[in-house]
C-alpha cells in the first residue's frame, strides 16, 4: 500500500502509519469540560486521505473483555478478507498488528498500540493482516468497524503466543484464550499448510480498493 498518504492531520484528527504497511494509528482530539468528553473517533474524509480509499462499513462489532483476555491472532482469507477500524471506548487493550502476508518484506513482523479511554486512539488494520489484542483492564470494550460481514468459512487464526513471533504481551498478565485461539497453528505451520494470504493477492485487492 502507498505510505504517501500519511502521516496526516486535520483539526480534530492526527494519523500515523505503523511499521507494518497497511496499518495506521488514528488519534482524535478530545474536548473535555465539566460535562464530560466529546471527540470524533472516526472521520471518513481523514480516513480516505490517509489510507487512499474510503472505508466501506458492512458490519460493526463490539467485545467486552476481562483483564487478560487475549483475542486473536485473527485474519480472513483474501479476497475479500476483512479490514478493521478498531477503537476502545472503555478500559484499555494492547492492540497488535502482524504482517502475515507471504512474500512481504516485513513478513512475521509486528507493531503494537495501546488503545484506551485516555488517549482514545484507533487502529486501522488492512485486509490480509493479522490482528490481536489483550485486555489490560476488566470491562475493556472494543468496537470494530468492519469492511465485510462475518464469514465463518473464510476466518482463520494463528497462535498469539507463538514464541517465534514474540508478541509483546505483558509478562504480569496471564493470558485467557478461547479454545479455538489456543488451538491455532503457529505462523510457520499456517504458512506450511497454505493458509496465509500472499502479498501479491493483497496488493491486487488494495489496488482495486484505491481505484
Image: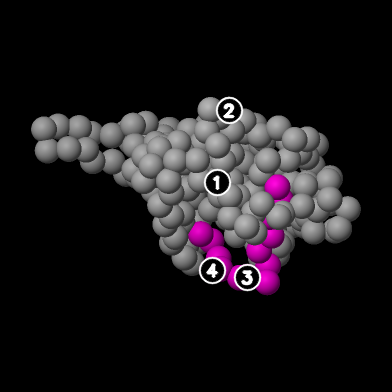
Residue 112 appears anywhere in the view = no
Task: Confirm whether the magenta stretch covers residue 204.
Answer: no
The residue carrying pointer 4 sits among few (fewer than 14), some (14 to 19) or many (20 or more) residues within 10 Å by Cα, namely few
Q: Nearer the viewer, mark 3 or mark 2?
A: 2
User: Dividing the image into 4 quarters, which one contains the N terminus?
Assistant: top right
Which percent across, then down, holds residue 161? 68, 40
Q: Earlier in the sequence, mark 2 or mark 4?
A: 4
Query: How far is disc 2 from disc 4 in space, using C-alphas?
Result: 34 Å
| Residues at marks 1 and 4 touching, judged by CB atoms closer than 8 Å | no
Between marks 3 and 1 in the image, the one whose residue lies nearer the viewer: 1
Do residues under tags 2 and 1 come within 8 Å of each other at their CB atoms? no
Instruction: Residue at 60% x, 59% y: name it.
Output: 82
Q: Residue at x 66, y 52 (%)?
A: 182
Comparing labels 4 and 3, the label whose residue is closer to the camera: 3
Q: Earlier in the sequence, mark 3 or mark 1?
A: 3
On the image, numbered disc 4 is attached to which residue?
149
Measured Cα–Cα span from mark 1 to mark 4:
26 Å
Residue at mark 4 to residue at mark 3: CA–CA distance: 10 Å
Apparent side of residue 99 relative to residue 172 in the rendered image (left or right): right
Provide the residue span drawn in magenta.
Answer: 146-159
> Which label is found at residue 176?
1
Q: Which residue is mark 3?
A: 152
Q: What residue is disc 2 on?
A: 171
Marks 4 and 3 in Cβ contact (< 8 Å) = no
Local SS, label 1:
loop
The secondary element bearing badge 3 is classed as helix
Q: Position of residue 127 (x, y in %)?
A: 64, 54
Amino acid at each position: 500500500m502507498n505510505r504517501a498518504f500519511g502521516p496526516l492531520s486535520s483539526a480534530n484528527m492526527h494519523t500515523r502509519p505503523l511499521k507494518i504497511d497497511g496499518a495506521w494509528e488514528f488519534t482524535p482530539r478530545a474536548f473535555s469540560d465539566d460535562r464530560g468528553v466529546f471527540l470524533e473517533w472516526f472521520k471518513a474524509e481523514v480516513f480516505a486521505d490517509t489510507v487512499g480509499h474510503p472505508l466501506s462499513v458492512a458490519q460493526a462489532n463490539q467485545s467486552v473483555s476481562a483483564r487478560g483476555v487475549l483475542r486473536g491472532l485473527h485474519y480472513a482469507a483474501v479476497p475479500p478478507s476483512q479490514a478493521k477500524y478498531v477503537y476502545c471506548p472503555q478500559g484499555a487493550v494492547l492492540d497488535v498488528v502482524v504482517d502475515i502476508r507471504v512474500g512481504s518484506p516485513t513478513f512475521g513482523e509486528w507493531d503494537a498500540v495501546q488503545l484506551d479511554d485516555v488517549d482514545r486512539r484507533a487502529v486501522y488494520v488492512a485486509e490480509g493482516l493479522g490482528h490481536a489484542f489483550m485486555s489490560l483492564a476488566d470491562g475493556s470494550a472494543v468496537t470494530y468497524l468492519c469492511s465485510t460481514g462475518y464469514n465463518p468459512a473464510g476466518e482463520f487464526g494463528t497462535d498469539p503466543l507463538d514464541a517465534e513471533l514474540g508478541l509483546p504481551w505483558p509478562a504480569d498478565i496471564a493470558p485467557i484464550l478461547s479454545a479455538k485461539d489456543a488451538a491455532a497453528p503457529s505462523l510457520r505451520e499456517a504458512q506450511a499448510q497454505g493458509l496465509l494470504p500472499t502479498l501479491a493477492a493483497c496488493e491486487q485487492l488494495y489496488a482495486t480498493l484505491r481505484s
